[in-house]
Image (cartoon, rainbow, N blue to C red):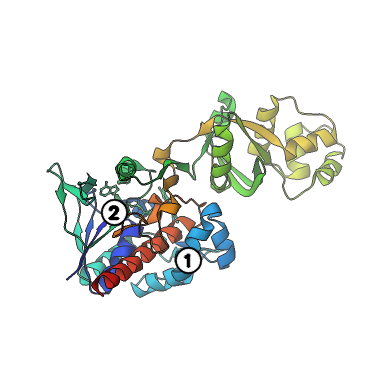
């Protein structure tokens, strides 16, 4: 009987193992950590956003330049298919007000528990504390148990699902990059994605407003604009709006200095705002007046002052322009060790639609270790589950072809 090994027990690897074992093929999953699915469990801490319910065309658009590559696997394992899969293993989902899809419990642990039980019923063998450390001369993967010597595990096909480079202490440390490069595979450098940005706040602003939310703002980097919410941190800004702009920020930072512009009242245009600001202020302080006339929160007013060095224009139009365009220099992106995901990975032109490495028949890849990125909103897990599913189907097709 054929034997398939999957290396990496995150959502992508477990999905590949599920598809292959459901067809009656023997599967062993190897993972370097003492248990599988650690990043999935962490993702569940803040509410596990499994996928998104928006129309498929909009959803595919979230993958930017990787859209074409991912459209086949996501077309075959869509958000609906993912929801049907979790229901099948006993985890109900719901659509939140933003269109994001979550499990009812919001957590990842019930999903992972039920899934591992199903994989065990399908005969999948889990071998934790087993690390992939390279290839032998015949390009077969070498696996080391604990500190033991590396061994070749016999396999008819191998799925690599080793994750990206974020949160390395959860197991996906990107050490595979040089191992794949040794095999002659093109790999783009792993860089932080969906991560906060650094701003050199004044001591007053950092201490007084660190942890506060800037709601209903829009942020612009170059030509990209994103509406949403930001959280002021001691070292910069976090939050969905900034995460979505990390590709643009990375590009701008690579050319030198980067700057963001925050629109504190994106729902009003500059002339509407100037009209409101031309009403008489009377004896009110600037802060009270801005709060009452245009409903700016204290943190937004402080940000306006912080960015202007406390020298705000006195005329209504000038003030309106400043509110629509708070300019802040960015010192950099936060490190990959705390990023939600990473950009970079195995070049997509190395991989066929069945997720097999074009130049290495029998070796498949899936999940975040591929060179695609997406914003938060469930798109990351959707991409990982879908490519894992495609790799599983790819393995079955490969085995069938070999035996015919
Ligand atoms: C804080 C946080 C919150 C998140 N929230 C969400 C969310 O709500 N929605 C969403 O869509 N996405 C979310 N994500 C992203 C999502 O969790 C990842 O995109 C996803 O887990 C990647 O799946 P994967 O299977 O490709 O890799 P991983 O989940 O990283 O799994 C890779 C596995 O490979 C193993 N491994 C790595 N190297 C080796 C080796 N050399 N030998 C053996 N084993 C190895 C690792 O131990 C790990 O178990 C979040 C991420 C973080 C960090």
- Answer above or below: position of 63 versus 148: below
**Nearest to the observer: residue 273 or residue 53:** 53
Residue reaching furthest left?
148
Closer mark to the observer between disc 1 and disc 2 = 1
Identify the residue under disc 1: 72
| x 45%, y 55%: residue | 380
> Residue 224 falls in which quadrant of the image?
top right
| x 35%, y 66%: residue | 394
Identify the residue under disc 2: 8
Label 2 secondary element: loop
Estimate the x, y position of residue 400 in percent, counting from the top left.
Answer: 28, 73
**Nearest to the observer: residue 134 or residue 46:** 134
* Beta carbon of the mark 2 residue lies under 8 A of ligand 1: yes
- Answer above or below: position of 210 versus 83: above
Q: Is residue 281 visible?
A: no
- Relative to 290, 45 lies left or right: left
Q: Residue 81: give its label.
A: none
- Residues under numbered marks 1 and 2 in contact, where contact means CB atoms less than 8 Å apart: no
- Answer above or below: position of 12 versus 397: above
| Placement of the N terminus among the 4 image quadrants | bottom left
| x 40%, y 45%: residue | 186
> Residue 87 falls in which quadrant of the image?
bottom left
Estimate the x, y position of residue 297 in percent, counting from the top left.
Answer: 67, 41
Estimate the x, y position of residue 310 in percent, counting from the top left.
Answer: 71, 25
User: Which of marks 2 and 1 precedes in the sequence?
Assistant: 2
| Placement of the C terminus among the 4 image quadrants | bottom left
**Nearest to the observer: residue 306 or residue 180:** 180
Instruction: Tell me the distance, in whole angstroms, between the alpha carbons under discs 1 and 2.
Output: 23 Å
């Amino acid at each position: 009987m054929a034997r398939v090994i999957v290396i990496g027990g995150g959502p992508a690897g477990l999905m590949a193992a599920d598809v292959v074992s459901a067809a009656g093929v023997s599967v062993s999953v190897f993972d370097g950590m003492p248990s599988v699915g650690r990043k999935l469990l962490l993702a569940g801490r803040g509410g596990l956003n499994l996928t998104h319910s928006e129309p498929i065309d909009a959803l595919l658009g979230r993958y930017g330049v990787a859209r074409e590559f991912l459209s086949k696997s996501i077309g075959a394992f869509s958000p609906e298919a993912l929801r049907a899969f979790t229901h099948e293993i006993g985890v109900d989902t719901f659509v939140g007000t933003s269109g994001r899809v979550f499990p009812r419990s919001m957590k990842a642990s019930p999903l992972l528990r039920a899934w591992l039980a199903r994989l065990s019923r399908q005969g999948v063998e889990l071998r934790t504390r087993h690390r992939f450390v390279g290839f032998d001369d015949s390009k077969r993967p070498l696996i080391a148990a604990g500190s033991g010597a590396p061994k070749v595990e016999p396999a008819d096909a191998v799925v690599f699902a080793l994750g990206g480079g974020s949160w390395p202490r959860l197991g996906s440390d990107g050490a595979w990059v040089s191992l794949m490069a040794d095999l002659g595979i093109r790999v783009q450098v792993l860089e932080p994605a969906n991560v906060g940005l650094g701003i050199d706040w004044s001591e007053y602003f950092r201490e007084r407003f660190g942890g506060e939310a800037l709601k209903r703002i829009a942020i612009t980097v170059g030509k990209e604009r994103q509406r949403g919410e930001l959280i002021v941190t001691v070292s910069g800004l976090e939050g969905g709006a900034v995460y979505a702009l990390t590709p643009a920020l990375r590009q701008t930072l690579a050319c030198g200095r980067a700057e963001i512009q925050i629109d504190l009242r994106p729902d009003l245009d500059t002339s509407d705002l100037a009209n409101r600001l031309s009403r008489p202020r009377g004896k009110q302080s600037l802060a009270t007046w801005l709060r009452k006339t245009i409903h700016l929160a204290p943190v937004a007013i402080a940000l306006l002052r912080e960015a202007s060095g406390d020298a705000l224009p006195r005329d209504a139009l000038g003030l309106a322009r400043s509110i629509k365009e708070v300019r802040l220099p960015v010192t950099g992106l936060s490190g990959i060790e705390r990023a939600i995901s990473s950009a970079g990975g195995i070049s997509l032109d190395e991989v066929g639609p069945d997720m097999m490495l074009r130049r290495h028949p029998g070796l498949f890849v899936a999940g975040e270790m591929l060179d695609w990125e997406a914003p938060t909103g469930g798109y990351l897990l959707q991409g990982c589950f879908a490519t894992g599913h495609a790799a599983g189907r790819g393995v079955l097709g490969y085995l069938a072809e070999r035996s015919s």
